[in-house]
Amino acid sequence: MTALSPYLAGLLLAAAVAVTWAARLWPTRPAPTARVESVAAVWRACHTTRCAHMTTRHDETPAGLVCRGCGTVAGGAA
Ligand SMILES: [Zn+2]
């Protein structure tokens, strides 16, 4: 078995670095798309039977916080 020449060892190292560098740059999966949500949406617990006291998104309206799951106007109490 012959020892690798320093030139060949350096070449192999450079090739390995180039492959891993290219693999990191190449996207394997598409980037997650940004979710467009209403700015006014807030997460609050909804105490109706439909939402079962789960935390759901609510929209801020002049009448109060409206649950997106059941449409109930919450009084603002969390
Ligand atoms: Zn609800």
Image: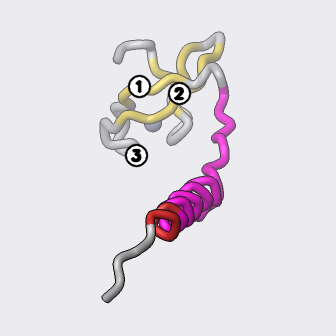
The tag earlier along the polypeptide, 2 or 3, is: 3
The image position of residue 4, as x and y in percent, is 40, 74
How crowded pointer 1 is (Cα within 10 Å; few <14, some 14-19, many 20+) is rated as: many
Please give the residue where the numbered disc 1 appears in the rendered image: 44
Distance between the Cα atoms at labels 1 and 3? 14 Å
Q: Is mark 2 within 8 Å of ligand 1?
A: no
The tag earlier along the polypeptide, 1 or 3, is: 1
Q: Is mark 3 within 8 Å of ligand 1?
A: yes
Please give the residue where the numbered disc 3 appears in the rendered image: 50
Disc number lying in front (2 or 3): 2
Give the magenta-colored segment's residue range. Answer: 11-38
In the image, residue 24 lies in the stretch drawn in magenta: yes
Quadrant in which the N terminus is drawn: bottom left
Q: Quadrant of residue 15?
A: bottom right
How crowded pointer 3 is (Cα within 10 Å; few <14, some 14-19, many 20+) is rated as: few
In the image, residue 75 lies in the stretch drawn in magenta: no
Residue at image location 35% in from the left, 77% down from the top: 3
Q: Are marks 1 and 2 in contact (CB under 8 Å)?
A: yes
Name the colouring of the figure.
Answer: secondary structure
| Label 2 element class | strand
Distance between the Cα atoms at labels 2 and 3? 14 Å
The image position of residue 34, as x and y in percent, is 65, 41
Residue type for callout 2 = His
Disc number lying in front (1 or 3): 1
| Label 1 element class | strand
* Mark seen at residue 58: 2
